[in-house]
Amino acid sequence: MAKLSVGFVGWRGMVGSVLMERMLKEKDFDGSYNPFFFTTSNVGGKGPDVGIDAPPLLDAFDIKELGKMNIVLTCQGGDYTNEVHPKLRATGWDGYWIDAASALRMKDNAIIVLDPVNRATIDQGLKDGVKDYVGGNCTVSLMLMGLGGLFEKGWVEWMSSMTYQAASGAGAKNMRELVGQMEAIGAVDPALKDPRGDILGLDRAVTTVMTADSFPTDNFGAPLAGSLIAWIDKAVDDGQTKEEWKGVAETNKILNTTERIPIDGCCVRIGSMRCHSQALTIKLKRDIPMSEIEAAIAAHNEWVEVVPNTKEDTLKRLSPAAINGTLKVPVGRLRKMNIGPEYLTCFTVGDQLLWGAAEPVRRMLNIALESLKK
């Protein structure tokens, strides 16, 4: 059998770079298939060093070259998908399209991939001839990685998620702007930073910097460092933002529910670099002992961790700083609420660029390759 061909698009961007890093770490470039790297700006240039030979960079808009691939994996973004995907399909191309962008997520003929949660749906899709597989929204994927055990048991009646989302979710330019804002704040008069100095003077100086026209806000549109932004994405119906709407729409699609689970909340951007956090209120269908809840969460997948509800463990293990760059999804602050015994609250954190972006499509690539080799 001839080697399969896999085309990579958007491999130099933020999510694509994390994908390449993960693939190299997991030795995914093992020579069992031929990788081809596509570009939107450097056709003919040298591709990334993945330990095996690859031809010069190909044009990411060349439908004929893309059509030679058995699989196309793209992290190039939704605009690219919207332009190229329909043209490629119109030629009769029948390969697998694996996409980190949101453009195809809610299409009837696409499956949102998060295999530790919905592997059965993915496998059934492969059997049924589904060809489009799309990574999910970052906060939805991270929430399901943390609390998949509760959904698997059928215990969740409804859920409300209050998110604390990192700058990375808005893109590389935004991450750099956050650092620029931090630098601007840090440049206030050093005398004001003296522990014996005027704290109200320091507060006024910081506020003056943050509200100045020169404060870098071109990407966020508002100060984030030392502040927050209680709006993510565009407005949709009923006062929601699209980011908030994705919570109910994508969760139910990933879980392939027959009865819609209500999910809503408020999505907020904070000054974290690349890890999203969520405070969750969960209405259970009945009063379930905490020991059973913790056991169900911990047993669901190998990456979720139940963090004891103590100050020491929370400070050490339940923050963006603690899990940045790892696949861990800690769930802590678990307790029953005084509203009633069927109400549960918890706090969870996950790396937005890993389980929230690159890792599900990396794993889907391996699943698709395995399917094609059968």
Image (cartoon, helix red, strand yellow):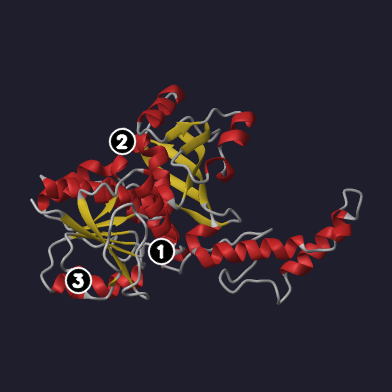
Q: Can you give x and y, in whole percent of width and height, for residue 368 in the image?
A: 20, 50
In the current view of this chain or complex, which residue is farthest to the front? Answer: 53
Q: Can you give x and y, in whole percent of width and height, for residue 285 in the image?
A: 37, 34
In terms of secondary structure, where does tag 3 sit? Answer: helix
Q: Amino acid at mark 1?
A: Arg
> Which mark is nearer the camera, 3 or 2?
3
Q: Is residue 62 left or right of residue 146?
A: left
Q: Amino acid at mark 3?
A: Glu
Q: Which residue is mark 1?
A: 12
Quick one: label 3 or label 2, which is nearer the N terminus? 3
Q: Is residue 335 left or right of residue 79?
A: right
Front in this rendered view, residue 372 or 78: 372
Q: Can you give x and y, in whole percent of width and height, for residue 234 in the image?
A: 45, 69
**Which residue is at a point 16% across and 50% down the rendered structure image?**
125
**Which residue is at a point 24% across and 42% down the rendered structure image?**
119
Residue 152 numbered mark, or none:
2
- Label 3 – label 2 distance at C-alpha: 42 Å
Query: Is 71 drawn above or below residue 127 in the view shown?
Result: below
Quick one: label 3 or label 1, which is nearer the N terminus? 1
Query: Is 323 drawn above or below residue 299 in the view shown?
Result: below
Q: Amino acid at mark 2?
A: Glu
Task: Tell me if label 3 and label 1 are in contact, CB under 8 Å.
Answer: no
Residue 76 numbered mark, or none:
none
Q: Quadrant of residue 242?
A: bottom left
Task: Tell me if label 2 and label 1 are in contact, CB under 8 Å.
Answer: no
